[in-house]
Amino acid sequence: MGIRNKGRDWRFQWSMVMIAAAALVAYNAVANLWLLHPASCPIPPTIPPTEPPTCEPCFGKVSSAGADYDPIYTLDLRLGRWDGSRSYKIFDNVAVGELYSEMSTNYHVCLATQSSIERLHELLRIAAHWTGPISVAVFVAGDEMRLLRAFTTWLYKCQPEIYSRLALHIIMPAEKPGYNDGSLPKWARDCDVIPLPHEERKAETVAWRARHPYPQNHMRNLARKNTHTSYVFLVDIDIVPSTGMAEALNQFLDSSPKCPLCAYVVPTYELDRRVAKFPANKSELVRLSRSKLAIPFHRKVFIYNQFASNFSRWEASGGNESELTHISHNVTNFELLYEPFYLASDTVPAHDERFLGYGFTRNSQVYEMFLIGYQFKVLSPIFTIHWGIQTRRNRPLWREKQNENNRKHFETFKKELFARYRKDPLHLLKRPQQAKKT
């Protein structure tokens, strides 16, 4: 009798152990399912029970309505890095298109540019002709940050082909930092409009901007240093490349011997606004030039800006859309105030950030390249265009004031260059530099 009772007790205990083990296995299975598919991503009721549920659409997403269409919504404006004077805060790669890295591998040249909110829409013209990667630095102050968010959202939603090739960077002033408050304007998700964000700025932001110089060289350095190609083509936001230039430069660089101290100059023209269409090729641009509907960049404002490129020789060399990109001629009459748009390795000197606003911002950097020994070589048949012919009477008075301030900085700058390179080929130290309008 005692033996039978002991047998029953043993079987009862073993059953309890098995039940507990089964319960533990079930608990672990449920827990694992919960971890893999948390409540924040519920399984849609339309998915049949036989299909494994997925959380991929919401994995790692920001828990904010509309964040999918606002690429820089999560930017923490308390972070960033300071410039050398702690006057500006810098944010690298705040929005990067999905193809930017891949294109930076497949192309030899990245176009780098910089812009304020006022001219940001000009980016669309550049991107329509330049099919490679683009690195763009944008200056924002106050409520301009919200408008930049809106424009980036519009690009993401309405111009995905352009957005996919972009890397966007931001600089904001310490004195009037940007802020993210406020909802985005309706046009941020309206693909039937071409937005002009600056038209919605607050009056106080516009007034502040009018009193403070634009940090062009900070912007140029930021755009340049976030490129990842072998060469950089640095232009201002209102300089539009000729069609197919990215591919043409790929072919040119593939077939050209390596030249570490070469800077390849791309001729730049101003186009009369009466011209309805962008010149299809060099031949058409030369015809417009002969009709005075296209002139060398800054010809009427400050002739020395591009004079050393020798546009007459470039036009006389011929060339059309079927001709491969090649070197037309070398620059042989370098001048102090020469400011070509060129492509080169990013090993060229940085743009000196003491120069703020207008005047001596680009030519100071090009002059240092000249001291190092860079050769400037003019390319054909590619070119760039600035829409509208500029005249001195259209220049505001504040621009000349900024030019005068930068002239004073240049007096120090040229002495520093002499101390660094022990060269003064243009004899700048023998006389003070006269104030020039640039």
Image: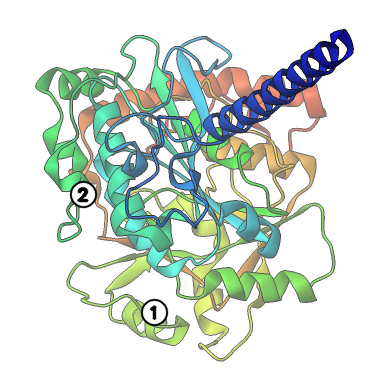
Q: Residue furthest bottom?
A: 322
Q: Badge 1: how crowded within 10 Å, few (<14), some, or many (20+)?
A: many
Q: Which residue is mark 1?
A: 285
Give whichever of 171, 59 is nearer the camera: 59
Q: Which residue is mark 2?
A: 189
Indicate the position of residue 290 as horizontal and vertical percent values: 34, 81
> Where, by quadrant of the figure, is residue 110 drawn?
bottom right
Q: Amino acid at mark 2?
A: Arg
Q: Is residue 340 above or below residue 3?
A: below
Indicate left or right for 363 with 416 as reference. Answer: left
Q: Is residue 409 above or below residue 282?
A: above
Distance from Cα at disc 2 to Cα at disc 1: 37 Å
Q: Amino acid at mark 1?
A: Leu
Q: Is residue 237 above or below residue 255?
A: above
Give whichever of 43, 311 is nearer the camera: 43
Indicate the position of residue 30 as horizontal and vertical percent values: 56, 31
Q: Is residue 302 visible?
A: yes
Residue placed at 43% from the left, 48% from the top?
236
Q: How many marks?
A: 2
Which mark's residue is nearer the viewer, 2 or 1?
A: 2
Ranked by sequence position, the earlier of labels 2 and 1 is 2
Residue placed at 55% from the left, 75% from the top?
314
Q: Is residue 224 above or below residue 414?
A: below
Residue placed at 71% from the left, 44% from the top?
370
Residue placed at 43% from the left, 25% from the top?
75
Q: Is residue 360 visible?
A: no
